[in-house]
Image (spheres, helix red, strand yellow):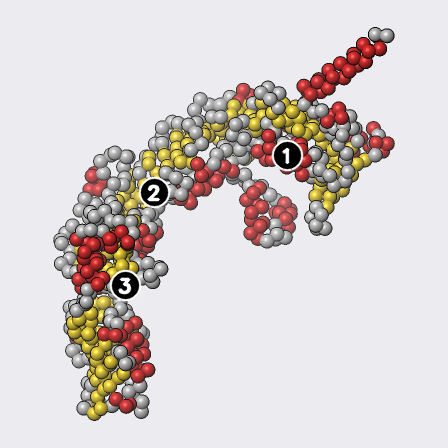
């Protein structure tokens, strides 16, 4: 009687042991219960299992002969840990997880139709690829999340559900839910990643890094024939700079190209290091350091070689975090194609894709060659004399060491919200500031910052005395000294209802320029160097032609600067009786006389107002020196004259205060205009008084004399003179003709 309970208990114990054994093997109780029901359209694995894919940390991939085991590290990277140690290609892990998550059942083959005679077609036994994914289930145990065997590609295409998109399908078998030997057809196909065997699943990219975290790049030539080159930046947004063997700006495009090439570098082969012998020292080493941690990424490149029967050039390479040797493409592949092959290539090149898309496909299939990576100083250094952002310049000056002559420039920044435009002021030695021609100033700064130099003629090592090199190229006694002052921050104050920005100073950048005979070639050229830099450059003449200390070069080309509200009288003198027009701004009324006769009823006020607006917009072609002989000779007998009598409000003290504030580099200004206006002290009192006090007025007379130049030119023009100041100028022919205005109704 006691035998039966004993037998039952033994059976239960054996079942429990069997279940425990299965759980110990793969942690999959569903393999015993077999509860999952396959139906077309359902995912291959349950939602519960798919939700655990992100936690998978262990993976086994098997084919008919080999097996690799992979594990995920704390940074999320997959590594092959058996039978060798190396990094798994990220594309392989991504493809496996994507297939596992998205595979849907298309159909199931009946068991009675599956025979040994057609088993080879399905591939689940003759050419299988078995994949097992596990997640942690305790300190030392793992639980299986998914397991399946991939067979061959099936002939069906699966519909994505939109009636247009079709997916390839694969024969598949899974015993994850019990001893089910049926063969399923599922959507998706990743068999291409196994076409070269499991050994080829190694990551063919020698380097993996986040380029936004990259801060330093070192390129080291091991034989010491070339000094070590170091590049660095302080943040992902900051520009790259070269700090060794010279201190200079870097060519951003070429540095970014180097980084992209390093990320896109793909090996032709990846082999265990014990299988090959390398030379003792590499040709050079590329070291990358960044915010990812203390360990740098190092790529060591060895000698170039060719293989028997293949004239392509390759090279070996190693990295410091993988015990493997990479075979890289050393130089771009050379093509040897006959006429027939060229014809086939031409047919294949037909633009069945849009040209841009076709170019992207070609680039994606092109393997990066080591020789294509910019890695020398001439390739990576910036070929700009001064890397200056025009929008960041507050002041600059151009002076000479051979006298007291010089010109200073000051920018009064505008404000978009207040509709106040930026204004450039300039001053020559011994004179106050006046308005500069903004387009000329901007053109000069753009030329300084953007026009490349012809070549770098000399470099000094960091810390080396530059004096001998400066003397060699005449820069110890420069023709010009250019100082540029950036603006780091701004404060604002409201004066006369306008928002006027003022700048706080920071250290200037100073450049020396000299026209000198090249010591090596004897050719006379412009040379330049920045104080504090280690390089001397031969400058482009496109920039040096803009160097000038003459006020006429920089003066604002607006001929007259006046508000219409200030106009009191306008006189037109054509060597006959002058036409005199009086203007009353508040009523917008005109009155006038001609030859002593009152002609007020005949004045067309619209024509007169239009004429004033034209005078406001009038620009000279060029300012001339006050002693220009040809202009003075022509103006001895001017053809006509325009005289303006104005009643101007005196803002001279306000302008002086604004300029003084803009030039002040010692005061620590408050952060905003409210703080500025409330601040105690002399500066705040000046600003408050300027904003509230009643302004004085004074009379101003401006007489413009016009005379034609010689008419043998293809482009005739007129000489002009501001009689009260003696300033000479050239006026375009059409503009001079427009000064002969017609105000009277006939």
**Residue at screen point 31% across, 38% down:** 247
The mark nearer the N terminus, 3 or 2, is 2
- Is residue 341 shown left or right of residue 415? right
The label shown at residue 249 is 2
Answer yes or no: do the residues labelled 1 and 3 have beta carbons within 8 Å? no
Identify the secondary structure beneath mark 3.
loop
**Residue at screen point 37% across, 43% down:** 239
Mark nearer the viewer, 1 or 3: 3
Disc 2: CA contacts within 10 A as few (<14), some (14-19) or many (>=20): many
* CA distance for labels 1 and 3: 64 Å
Disc 1: CA contacts within 10 A as few (<14), some (14-19) or many (>=20): few
Mark nearer the viewer, 3 or 2: 3
- Is residue 139 shown left or right of residue 153? left
**Residue at screen point 59% across, 30% down:** 55
Figure check: 711 above or below 438? below
In the picture of the structure, the residue carrying the numbered disc 3 is 497
- Residue 336 at what x, y percent from top left? 58, 41
**Residue at screen point 24% across, 49% down:** 669
* CA distance for labels 1 and 2: 50 Å
Can residue 661 be seen in this snapshot? yes
- Residue 731 at what x, y percent from top left? 26, 73
Identify the secondary structure beneath mark 2.
strand
Figure check: 414 above or below 245? below
The furthest residue to the top: 2
């Amino acid at each position: 009687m006691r035998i039966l309970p004993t037998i039952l208990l033994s059976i239960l114990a054996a079942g429990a042991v069997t279940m425990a054994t299965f759980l110990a093997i793969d942690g999959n109780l569903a393999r015993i219960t077999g509860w999952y029901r396959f139906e077309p359209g359902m995912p291959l694995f349950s939602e519960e299992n798919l939700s655990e894919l992100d936690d998978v940390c262990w993976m086994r991939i098997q084919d008919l002969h080999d097996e690799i085991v992979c594990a995920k590290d704390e940074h999320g990277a997959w590594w092959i840990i058996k039978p060798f140690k190396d990094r798994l290609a990220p594309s392989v892990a991504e493809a496996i997880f994507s297939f596992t998550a998205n595979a849907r059942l298309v159909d199931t083959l009946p068991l009675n139709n599956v025979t040994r005679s057609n088993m080879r077609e399905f591939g689940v036994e003759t050419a299988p690829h078995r994949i097992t994914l596990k997640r942690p289930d305790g300190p030392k145990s793992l639980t299986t999340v998914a397991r399946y065997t991939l067979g061959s590609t099936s002939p069906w295409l699966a519909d994505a559900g939109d009636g247009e998109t079709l997916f390839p399908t694969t024969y598949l078998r899974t015993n994850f839910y019990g001893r089910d030997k049926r063969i399923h057809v599922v959507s998706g196909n990743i068999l291409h990643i196994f076409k070269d065997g499991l050994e080829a699943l190694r990551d063919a990219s020698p380097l993996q890094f986040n380029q936004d975290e990259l801060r330093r790049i070192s390129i080291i030539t091991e034989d010491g024939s070339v000094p070590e080159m170091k590049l660095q930046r302080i943040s992902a947004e900051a520009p790259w700079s070269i700090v060794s063997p010279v201190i200079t700006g870097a060519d951003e495009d070429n540095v970014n190209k180097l980084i992209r090439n390093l990320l896109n570098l793909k090996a032709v082969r990846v082999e265990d290091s014990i299988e090959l012998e390398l030379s003792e020292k590499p040709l050079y080493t590329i070291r990358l350091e960044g915010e990812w941690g203390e360990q740098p990424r190092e790529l060591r490149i060895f000698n170039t070689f060719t293989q028997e029967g293949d004239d392509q050039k390759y090279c070996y390479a190693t990295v410091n975090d993988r015990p493997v040797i990479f075979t890289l493409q050393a130089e771009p592949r050379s093509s040897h194609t006959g006429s027939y092959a060229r014809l086939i290539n031409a047919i294949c090149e037909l633009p069945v894709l849009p040209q841009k898309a076709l170019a992207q496909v070609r680039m994606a299939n092109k393997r990066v060659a080591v020789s294509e990576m910019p890695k020398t100083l001439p390739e990576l250094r910036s070929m700009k004399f001064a890397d200056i952002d025009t929008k960041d310049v507050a002041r600059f000056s151009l002076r000479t060491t051979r006298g007291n002559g010089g010109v200073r420039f000051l920018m009064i920044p505008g404000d978009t919200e207040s509709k106040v435009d930026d204004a450039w002021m300039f001053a020559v030695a011994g004179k106050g500031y006046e308005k500069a021609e903004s387009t000329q100033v901007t053109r000069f700064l753009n030329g300084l910052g953007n026009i490349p130099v012809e070549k770098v003629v000399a470099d000094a090592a960091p810390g080396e005395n530059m004096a001998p090199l400066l003397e060699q190229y005449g820069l110890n006694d420069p023709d010009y000294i250019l100082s540029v002052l950036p603006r780091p921050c701004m404060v604002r104050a409201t004066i006369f209802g306008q928002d006027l920005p003022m700048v706080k100073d920071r250290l200037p950048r100073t450049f020396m320029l000299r026209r000198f005979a090249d010591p090596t070639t004897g050719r006379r050229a412009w040379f330049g160097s920045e104080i504090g830099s280690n390089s001397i450059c031969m400058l482009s003449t496109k920039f040096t032609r803009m160097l000038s200390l003459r006020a006429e070069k920089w003066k604002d080309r607006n001929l007259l600067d006046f508000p219409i509200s200030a106009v009191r009288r306008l006189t037109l003198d054509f060597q006959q009786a002058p036409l005199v027009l009086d203007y009353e701004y508040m009523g917008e009324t005109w009155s006038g006389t001609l030859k002593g006769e009152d002609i007020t009823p005949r004045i067309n006020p619209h024509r007169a107002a239009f004429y004033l607006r034209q005078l406001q917009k009038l620009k000279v072609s060029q300012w001339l020196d006050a002693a220009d002989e040809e202009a003075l000779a022509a103006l001895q007998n001017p053809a006509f004259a325009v005289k303006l009598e104005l009643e101007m409000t005196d803002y001279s003290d306000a302008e002086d205060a604004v300029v003084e504030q803009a030039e002040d580099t010692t005061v620590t200004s408050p952060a905003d205009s409210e703080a500025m206006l409330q601040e105690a002290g002399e500066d705040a009192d000046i600003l408050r008084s300027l904003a509230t006090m009643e302004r004085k007025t004074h009379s101003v007379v401006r007489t413009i004399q016009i005379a034609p130049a010689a008419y043998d030119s293809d482009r005739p023009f007129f000489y002009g003179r501001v009689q009260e100041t003696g300033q000479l100028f050239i006026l375009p022919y059409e503009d001079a003709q427009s000064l002969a205005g017609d105000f009277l109704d006939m």
